Amino acid sequence: MEKITNEFLQESYYKSTLPNGLTVILFPKPLIKRSYAMLTVKYGSIHQEFKINGSDEIISTPAGVAHFLEHKMFEMPNKVDASNLFAELGADVNAYTSHENTSYYFSTVMNFEKSLELLLDFVQTPYFIEESVEGEKKIIEQEIMSSLDKPSSVCYHGILRNLFEKNKVIDDIGGTKESINLINKDILQMCYNTFYHPSNMFLVIAGNFDLEKTLDLVKTNQENKDFNPYLNPVVINYFENNKVNKEYDSFMMDVNISSVSVGLKLDLYESTPQEILKIAVLFDFILEERFDYSSENYQKWLREQIIDYTFTFNFSLCKTHAYITIDGQAPDPNIFIDVIRKELLNIPNIKFNEERFTNFIRSHIAYQIRKFNSVEAIANALNDEAIDGTELFDKLLALQTLKFEDIKSVYKYFDKDSISSFVVLPKEN
Amino acid sequence: MDIINLQNLNLYYNYDSRFKTICVCLYFSFPINEKYIPELSILTQMMQKTSASYPTEEEFAYYLKSIYDTSFSITSSRIGKVQCLRVSVSFINPKYIKEDINIVEKAINFLYESLLYPNFSIDNLELEKNILTQFHNNTYNNKTKYASVRFTEEMYKNEVQSINANGTVESVKNVTIESIKEAYTYLINSPCYIFVTGDTPIKPICDELNKYDLSVFRKYELTSELEFIDNYKKDINQVVEIVEEQDINQTIMFIGYRSDIRRNTKYRFAYSFLSAMLGEYFHSTLFQVVREKYNLAYSIGSSTLINKGAIHVFARISKDNIEFAKKLIFEEIEKYQDGDIDDKTFELTKSSRINDILKNGDSPFNPLYDLQEELMGCGKISDEIIINNITNLTKEDIVEVANMLVLDTIYILKGRA
């Protein structure tokens, strides 16, 4: 086991890769009562087209398969529901699907080892029957319907479709009513066989557990299972340049005020994970300075009623796509878009203040330290970093080594061709 | 947990080595007073954004960031007919800070000054009134919130429970600097105590607090006149059913039940357990029947208002399935009332509930929850007592409380699409 320590924080964690390819990351916190374990598959909603075993044939799947699989994995043979087995052990279990991965997790104070075995077993026991697959479609359809009634969710998906043309990030994680109707048990099984291999998975555990005993348990559990050879999936990714697909679009809903999203598309594919960490911190600084509630702009726009209290910004950075969105409700969406667009384009001309940069670094170091108050936060950070290809303490290191002058390195991303906007407008009665 | 007398106030101290932050809080409790509802909502926002020393939101936030992102917050909660405000400052333990910035002194000074030297400028007041008005208007856009607000208004008409913590659009208009100052006086004069938690000896914290005059605050006494339990009884002659329509894809349904059970009655554990069995877990009855067996919903669940004796059931369904979903929910509750309770659901709920209680032990505020119970006049409680009560529950206990349920209100926000 490799031990990774940060002396300043007085924290350590351990990493090991098992012979079957499963990466295990263990972060003991013996004084905390609970343990939190998360098993992640590097398979998310954007992985819709792929090749296997070195073949040139592209396999295309409907949008929403990863999310559908997440729902169906809880169903085990003999009508056993995995969540009931966790409840018997006194553990909470849940799962989520994102653009890049699917994660299954539990937390418990009791029966940690049995719960851990159960986590490994239920995710590694595919069981799909046509009847229950059909039933699940109705549940997922309701899940999709609920997001269609949320203006913020409609705006989010709208801006993604404006920013990107081919990248699968434009598809809702759950798919659409039409796409989920194309899913059947054979597709689920094929995608399971392709992506749910230990080589494409990692296990993160944080909390109260015995380090050696836990690693032995995972090893034994994995040694006792037969896995088919890894199919080495090569996902067809659509790396797009920074030009937006569409500059503007809108949608009407039964709401009484418009919701707006202004997006900035970023092209960061050439950067290493460590470089991306630094770029992310620099973007955070710029966004906080110009759009945070504590910024001069925010206060001015709020008083002028260009924005309202829902105003927010988001920075998303994945291996295949990156973007910034600035969102909120607006009495006049055109003014909102105009003001935000001008502000984004003006960023390279702004003289940022070094003292404020130092203060920003200080506050973000504190944010990194606070993370260690919660085993869920630790495990989620380890999970995110494992997906990004960085280590848990790298962000802290990036914060401690960044220089004020580095800000200039991201000015080039604030380009007029990279900006788009999407509006949800009130439907006229 | 230690109790220290500090200038006549009780300071409750929970040493906890597990966390990298230290938290100092002042807890105020006062009767929910309709007169000050929008004022208190606006006041807490104003106090969280500016103070006499930091009169703009930029200056206020910038200073907090400069002391390692110290957080200052005022959170409001309701317990029965009482409103509780927690004013707290949470900061990084100095042992994790390389530079010598005396964070303990600065954070406590910030807490005291923000609380006792607020900035009630007209400009800030007008801004907060605008924000609160936008917040009210925005309810229409959040369909779940809209349905929940409408359901509460209908089920608890003319009761304390129906008073919106943020007032109404009309009441916000009438807020003035004078009424804000009155509400502030009401808050500051209400009983309070201090709670400190973190990996720190208490002496340096007390030394810092003792630099200030705490006699301006009123001590919280156990013999408090506060009514934490809402004993209001409604005569239900007929179930109220309200259906509203909007141009949305999905239908949202709330079903409200009442009972005479309250936090201070012997049935409290069984009642909360009943709600948990019905709809708080994946294995719960309504989730298993409405979602898993009949595939009618993605979201279905229940919750309890133990200080009010109510249970609410919530579902998001297709408009075509309203009657069927209602029928299934009523049937399942009737089965409970008839004693038809599944052994497995009963046992799974016990183990899940106990795990939840044990997990609470990881919160630095956990000892405070037990203390609050005592301060509410509901006697001593601890995780051990709660677990014992849950362990000893029988199916007969659940049947007994299920039979105390009285259906009160059904609210449906129906989708036209």
Image: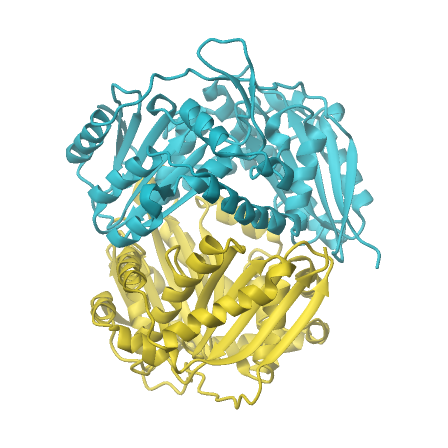
Q: Write down the quadrant of residue B90 in the picture.
A: bottom left
What residue is at 74 percent from the left and 39 percent from the top?
A: A422
Report x, y in % for residue A337. Answer: 77, 40
Q: Is residue B255 left or right of residue B277?
A: right
Image quadrant assignment for residue B269: bottom left
Q: Give whichever of A148, B74 is nearer the camera.
A: A148
Residue B18, placed above or below residue B228? above
Residue at screen point 50% across, 62% down: B114
Which residue is nearer to you in this view: B93 or A205? Answer: A205
Percent x, y of residue B277:
36, 65
Kindly indicate the quadrant of the structure image that contains residue B154: bottom right
Q: Tell me: B228 left or right of B151.
A: left
Residue A352, horizontal then vertical, whole percent: 63, 31
Instruction: Give the percent coordinates (x, y) of residue B95.
Output: 29, 43
Query: In the displayed structure, does residue A298 sit left or right of residue A335?
Result: left
- Measuring 21% from the left and 48% from the top, which residue is drawn there? A111
What is the drawing colour of chain B?
A: yellow
Indicate the chain coloured cyan by its letter: A
Q: Nearer the viewer, residue A420 or B156?
A: B156
- Residue A269 against residue B130 in the figure, above or below: above
Residue that protrudes farthest toward the front in the picture? A131
Q: Is residue A315 visible?
A: yes
Depth check: give the residue in front, B180 or A342.
A342
Residue A358 seen by the camera: no
